[in-house]
Amino acid sequence: MTEERSGAGEPVDSVLGALADPTRRRLLDLLAARGEVTATSLAAEVPVSRQAVVKHLAILDAAGLVTGRRAGREVRYSVRPAALDATARWMASLASEWDRRLASVKRLAEAAEAADRDSYNGS
């Protein structure tokens, strides 16, 4: 598979796993829009408790998507784009591979169609 070829396996798996949850995607969107934000501020924007937000942020952090920085008693979270960039590169590589395969199928189908047309016209 493309993952193995590019060596992206584990980081891509953890990013995709983290992004599988709609609440985590929403938190990531909020962080991207607002910069550094506390879990308390984020909890006001989603339909889950602050404790649930902290758990979701821990999963995003483990996937390399966010980072937390202590500022006094608060932890301020922000987006870390590197893991998203690596996943986007893997997805682009996968899409490119599929585009190549589909173009090959199209060429074969067009060649078969032309051969059928030539054989029908030549009969």
Image (cartoon, rainbow, N blue to C red):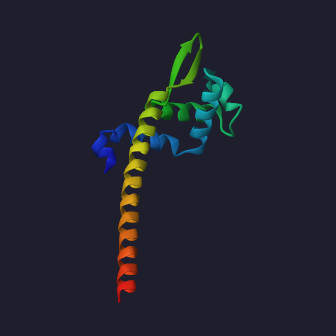
Q: Is residue 59 left or right of residue 6?
A: right
Res 37 quadrant in image = top right
Snapshot quadrant of residue 123: bottom left
Q: What residue lies at 43% left-to-right and 43% top-to-bottom? A: 92
Which residue is nearer to you in this view: 32 or 103? Answer: 103
Asked whether residue 62 appears in the rendered view, the answer is: yes
* Residue 76 spot, x, y in % from top left: 58, 19
User: At x 35% / y 76%, what residue is drawn?
Assistant: 115
Of residue 22 and residue 35, the one placed in the foreground of this image is 35
Residue 65 relative to residue 13: left or right: right
Number of marks present in the image shown = 0
Looking at the image, which is closer to me, 29 or 72? 29
Q: Residue furthest right?
A: 44
| Image point (61%, 34%), residue name | 29
User: Residue 100 location in percent, x, y?
Assistant: 37, 54
Q: Is residue 1 above or below residue 15?
A: below
